[in-house]
Image (tube, rainbow, N blue to C red):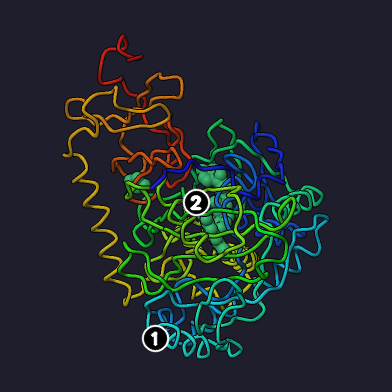
Amino acid sequence: MIARAELPPVWSQDVDLRRPPRLVADARVDVCIIGAGIAGLTIAKLLSADHVVAILEARGPGAGETGRTTAHLTHALDDRYHRIIQLHGEDRARLAAESHTSAIARIEALARSLDQDCEFEWVDGFLFAPPGSDGSHLELEIEAAHRAGLSEVDWVARAPLASFDTGRCLRYPRQAQIHPLKYVSGLVSALERAGVRIHGDTRVMQVEGGAPARVLTQSGAVITADAVVVATNTPMNERVNIHTKQAAYRTYVLAAAVPRGSVPRALFWDTAQRADDEGKQGAPYHYVRVANGPSGDVLIVGGEDHKTGQAHDESDRFGRLEAWASERFSAMGDVVARWSGQVLEPVDSLGFIGPDPTGQQNVFIVTGDSGNGMTGGTVAGILLADLVRGVENPWAPLYDPARITVRSLPRFARENLDAATHLVGDRIKPSEVSSLSSIEPGHGALVRSGREKIAVYRDPHGDLHACSAVCTHLGCLVHWNRSARTWDCPCHGSRFSPHGSVVNGPAVDDLAPAELPIPRVANRE
Ligand SMILES: Cc1cc2nc3c(=O)[nH]c(=O)nc-3n(C[C@H](O)[C@H](O)[C@H](O)COP(=O)(O)OP(=O)(O)OC[C@H]3O[C@@H](n4cnc5c(N)ncnc54)[C@H](O)[C@@H]3O)c2cc1C
Ligand code: FES
């Protein structure tokens, strides 16, 4: 299998988002939102008419998972209604379906109100079984979808794909798709016009609940606010609670040129399961859509998920995706983009949106996107705007971050045992390389130095760099990701750049500097 390097997501090839200025002085606002992805920007938009709002963003708007999504806007939830009914009951499954349906409508309304054409389109969605499967999963799912109130979901003989017979499958009418970064760009302009202060390059290090609450940034500037919303994809404001109830997964995407109109505008998913995810029923292993390209369409195909920090074949996964896609889409041309991203899988299959579960006063969180975070982030906008205003919302109990779902306890135990096993077991493993000379340029490896493990990276010029391999969240050891070229933590999904800076939380501190495990003189070998 040929290892393929990542290329920037197809969305960033035609949208260049400017980084807003850094926060340099203390400020007092009504609402401080941390994170400028779809969740943070939507919450800000829905509060900006009657609140003074500031957004603090570690990088720039859309720089997180929102810039890496495939932006299928759907109520066909990844975790499937038959599982959601098992875990939460029929009434709550109806609320879940209703909230994601409302989110699609809200995205349409917001997109149409922006100056920017966000390429929002209504399309059908098709869920099909992979070859060799008996289709019983689809039988279960259509019955569950109807019980959840999605009565329009129906059977069709096959998805409308000329070169690929999916077999009998489910059709979900009135789903949608969008260009995520054009949507982000439009929201940012609208927020700036409404007087919302957006600060980029402003990493938040700590949140203190209270009346008012305080947000402490890396530069020392502090924001004081009546309410704080932590919309950082995975909460950075607390270390344990929520992170025991969800697990981070990497997922892979490629985009390939296809002639305009050769693949119909629709959303497609199969029901294959992730090989390493026995607790989850029917997670989509492949997801497909079409978007506008510079001279034709682009076919976007995703899948090959694995738990963050726990694979050793990351870059081979693009090859497998490409093989899967080219077998099914005869019109597929050159691959124009190839990227990976992160999703957070809650153990009981629904997002966590609401008051901070550790009881921090006037602090709210949104997380647990589970591959449906474009609608999930919009649900958060609607729900948290109500909660911040003190208005009751019927979705609040469903998404309460403090909930404990008894029927998900086996998966809860499995995920936490897995983290504990890494915390202890990875420390006693030997060095990953016999000598530093075997670390290739552009890659890294863990090397033992006495009792410590050092994360050693060789840059493209051949120079070696070292930092501690101990994740600054709760102390598991990071693992080199050959595809994204990052240090990834197998416990709760924190990720760090080759030189140790935080890329994804929950960690907020960079990896500690360390000495190379050999004398400096051997730096260039
Ligand atoms: C490959 C892929 C495909 C997907 N496909 C779909 C799909 O088809 N449909 C769907 O609905 N969902 C999909 N998802 C999920 C969806 O894209 C995400 O759930 C969603 O974009 C998350 O939005 P967010 O605002 O919560 O997080 P993000 O977009 O990650 O935004 C969080 C922001 O917080 C910032 N931040 C983090 N820590 C700090 C800090 N300490 N201080 C300040 N700022 C901080 C980050 O820089 C980031 O910009 C997909 C995800 C991936 C990766
Ligand atoms: S992410 Fe929790 S220990 Fe690394």
> Is 382 situated above or below 38?
below
Kind of residue indicated by mark 2? Gly
Residue 136, label in figure: 1
Q: Is mark 2 within 8 Å of ligand 1?
A: yes
Q: Position of residue 130 (x, y in %)?
A: 43, 74
Kind of residue indicated by mark 1? Ser
Q: Upstream in the sequence, badge 1 or badge 2? A: 1
Q: Nearer the viewer, mark 1 or mark 2?
A: 1
Residue 407 visible within the image: yes
Residue neighbourhood size for the residue with mark 1, other residues' Cα within 10 Å, grouped as few (<14), some (14–19), many (≥20): few
| Residue receiving disc 2 | 341
Q: In percent of the image, x 47 and y 59: which residue is there?
A: 356
Q: In percent of the image, x 69 and y 52: which residue is there?
A: 184
Q: In percent of the image, x 46 and y 51: which residue is there?
A: 318
Q: Secondary structure at mark 1?
A: helix
> Is 6 situated above or below 360?
above
C-alpha span from label 1 to label 2: 30 Å
Q: Nearer the viewer, residue 235 or 107?
A: 107
